[in-house]
Image (cartoon, rainbow, N blue to C red):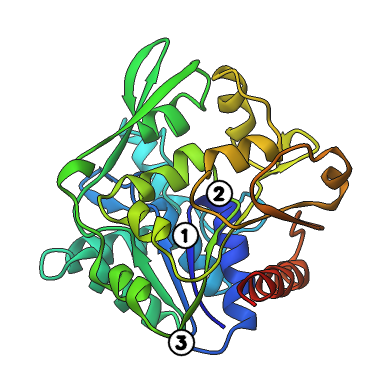
Amino acid sequence: MTVLALAGGVGGAKLANGLASVLPEGDLVIAVNTGDDFVHMGLHISPDIDSVTYALAGMNDSVRGWGVKDESWAFMEATRHLGGEGWFNLGDRDLATHVLRTQLLTKAPLSAVTADIAARLGIRQAIVPMSDDPVRSMILTDDGEMAFQDYFVRHQCAPRFRSIRFAGAETARPSAALVAAFEDPALEAILICPSNPILSIDPILSVPGIRQRIVDRRVPCVALSPFIAGQAVKGPAAKIMTELGLPTTADTIARHYEGLIDGLVIDEADVPGWTGEGPTIHGADILMRNVDQQQALAHAILAFAANLRS
């Protein structure tokens, strides 16, 4: 199958890695959230792109869930010793990616830079940013509005979440590679990874044209729930939904993506409690504890999407 996957964060990176390992080379485009991007210490940081890139390169830290495995921290230690900003950790190996990206961005757009870095790491599937134009997620909390990384990292998601806006989205354009993926006559399925719907997927959908292209789809669109038994597998999705007065269930995910999806994959333990209407559901073990389970889930989702298409 030729597949377009929308991804962000750790959950998106895990499924993207599973898909990349079971699909033939060139049959997968992973469109990644860049609402989390920011400039820190003069460097352009693209956390979600890096999570996906490191996962597909086999160099991600599966214990922390972010960054590079077998990392060292001499740079951060020296930075803190000098009184510099230490709230956002940059490992020594990870730092090389940010330095290179920042240099390359002086001559090329983020799409080209992302493709270049992926190729240098031996990645054979396409990783594309949602847009080459800056779109920045801004979080409204009880403590006021703050940039995404201030909310997510500096404050550890502690302030009460009120709403989110996407600064710059109104004038942004989908990346050319993403548009090409939508228009590819070989496209057979669109997948929404088990990323945080509000923090990771909504920024992608905020870019003009992307949501409408999914609405106008000619192929099935399948989402994977980020919840198991009312809890998020990782990250603040459950906390945010609760603060918005929403139940942390597959029903909520189905409503969030209403009009966009034909199918929803939920954990097999949640199937008996499914009460929603709308998309067709499929139960599976969605935890993805290791690479084998990432691949097994990828196979299950691709088969489900194929059945919906037929």
Residue 287 on image: x %, y %: 76, 54
Q: Do the residues labelled 1 and 2 touch (CB within 8 Å)?
A: yes
Question: Which of disc 2 and disc 3 is earlier in sequence?
Answer: 3
| Residue, disc 2 | 195
- What's the distance in space between the residues labelled 3 and 2, CA to CA? 23 Å
| Residue, disc 3 | 26
**Left/right of residue 207 with respect to residue 240 in the rendered view:** left
Q: Nearer the viewer, residue 54 or 8?
A: 8
Asked which quadrant contains residue 88, the reply is top left
Question: Up-down: is 122 above or below 305?
Answer: below
Secondary structure category for the residue under label 1: strand
**What's under tag 2, amino acid-wise?**
Ser
Question: Up-down: is 272 above or below 140?
Answer: below
**Left/right of residue 183 with respect to residue 68 in the rendered view:** left
Residue 138 on image: x %, y %: 32, 30
**What's under tag 3, amino acid-wise?**
Gly
Question: Up-down: is 167 above or below 125?
Answer: above
